[in-house]
Amino acid sequence: MTGIQNLVTIIQSCVCGSGNPCNHQCSSEYCVDGTVLVSGDSCDTCLSNALGTGGQCESQVNTQCAADSDCSAYLGCANQCP
């Protein structure tokens, strides 16, 4: 459970907060509790854009997660598990 919690914290540190790309769109959901209420809503779309290829947070999140053994292990499983 630690891996997913660390990943959420890493993502929140980049997308949430003043001046960050999803602060407004996710202020009542992902930035509060790490979840998206409705798939395809403005927060979900913002997260997809910020974390996707070339997104403002892609590099930062990937680098920080790779440096965190629990986060890295979680993503390793999530990306390879059926």
Image: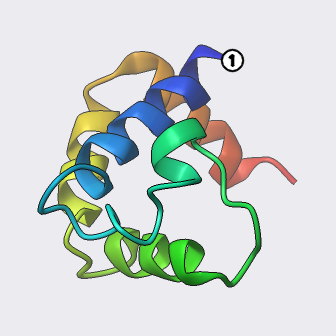
From this viewpoint, which residue is outermost toward the right? Answer: 82
In the image, residue 78 lies at what x, y percent? 68, 46
Quadrant holding the N terminus: top right
Q: How many marks?
A: 1
| Image quadrant in which you'd find residue 42 | bottom right
Quadrant holding the C terminus: bottom right
In the image, residue 79 lies at what x, y percent? 64, 53
Pointer 1 residue: 1
Q: In the image, is residue 25 above or below residue 32? A: below
Q: Is label 1 in a helix, a strand or a loop?
A: loop
In the image, residue 22 lies at what x, y percent? 34, 67
Q: Disc 1 marks which amino acid?
A: Met
- Residue in the image at 38% along x and 47% along y: 11
Q: In the image, is residue 81 above or below residue 42? A: above
- Residue in the image at 27% along x and 41% along y: 13
In the image, residue 6 lies at what x, y percent? 46, 25
Q: 41 or 60: which is nearer to us?
A: 41
Crowd class of label 1 (few under 14; some 14 to 19; many from 20; radius 10 Å): few
The scheme the figure's colours follow is rainbow
- Residue in the image at 24% along x and 36% along y: 64
| Image quadrant in which you'd find residue 2 | top right
From this viewpoint, which residue is outermost toward the left? Answer: 19
Q: In the image, is residue 35 above or below residue 46? A: above
